Image: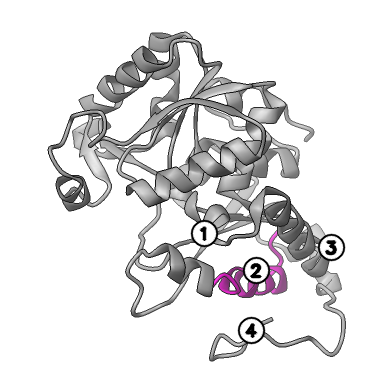
Amino acid sequence: MVDENNKVFIMTQPYQKLSHWANPANKLFRYQVGFTCPPQDYDAAPSDFLRMSPRSVGVHGWMLHLPEYRHRLDQRRDHFSLLEDFVHCMANNGVDACGQVGSNWVHASGLGVDGIRDFCNRMTDTYQTPFHMAGYAMVEALRDMNVEKVALNAAYHHPSWWQGTVSFLIEAGFDVLWAGNFHDQGWFTTQEEVNDCIWCFDGDLAEKSFAYVAEQAPDADAYLINGMCNFRSGEDGLAERPLHLAPALEAMLGKPVVGHDIALYWRLYKTLGIAPVTPQGQLLSSLTTME
């Protein structure tokens, strides 16, 4: 637990989730999901997840609050305890599963693959509420698909960000054949130009960048994309994430396409025992409902 000064302290009594949440009649929705995202990010995960879910699903978002946040990895490491605050609050309010959006938190933590697994398990056990992190959900999804060789479309991520993702994947046992961001791929002349796009890019860059990655690593079992990249490819130029583009990209590449958004949603659905009600890419389409 943390106090208002972000200092860790020990609970004097074991946490007990309010018993009335065990009765479905006391909940707004049969399946209640909580999402959190990095500070200063207006995240699409709650909207995306809700739009493809059964009507029995409800979603609530929590935007982590660090007024001086500058998207640095050391800030994520130093404020890692905010994630426990998030899970605790969501558990108090009857959430059935929690999802942490963003791929960098797992490697920024310094805990390693097994340490992140243990952290997620501890949050789940302590607050009687399953907790999943996007970076570790990617590992779980690839293992479930029996994938061994991958290539990473690092999209807009700074080199220190995507190199951390590569190290995390290698530690988890995957063979990373190639990795690089939009600057490395030659679509922008500097990383600063990538940054100026504020994580939202022209729609045709999705296919162009994945075609480039596939050329570099034709033997990959699956093609990955970092973070929650946005492409102006929807109706009226609406920003869309890898979730929306996976079916078309998979048809083009002949291989699975897995983003950290897709992997996190897959892990949450798997926990809840339900599946999307709209057509999706290979990973999400592998789910079956237990309703």
Label 3 to label 4: alpha-carbon separation: 26 Å
Camera-nearest label, 3 or 4:
4
Closest to the camera, between mark 3 and mark 2, is: 2
Mark 4 or mark 2, which is nearer to you? 4
Q: Residues within 10 Å of mark 1 (few under 14, many from 20)?
A: many
| Contact between labelled residues 2 and 3, with CB atoms less than 8 Å apart | no
- The residue at which mark 1 appears reads as 108
CB contact under 8 Å: marks 4 and 2: no
Q: Which residue is mark 3?
A: 22
- Which residue is found at the position 69% from the left and 81% from the top? 1
Q: Nearer the viewer, mark 1 or mark 3?
A: 1
Residue 89 pos. (x, y %): 64, 74
Are circles 1 and 3 on residues that touch, CB within 8 Å?
A: no
What is the CA distance from the residue labelled 1 to the residue labelled 3? 35 Å
Amino acid at pointer 4: Val
Q: Quadrant of the C terminus?
A: top right
In the foreground, 47 or 102:
102
Q: Which dot marks residue 2?
A: 4
Q: Amino acid at mark 1?
A: Ala
Distance (Cα) linking label 4 and label 2 = 15 Å
Disc 3 residue type (three-letter): Ala
Q: Main secondary structure of the magenta part?
A: helix
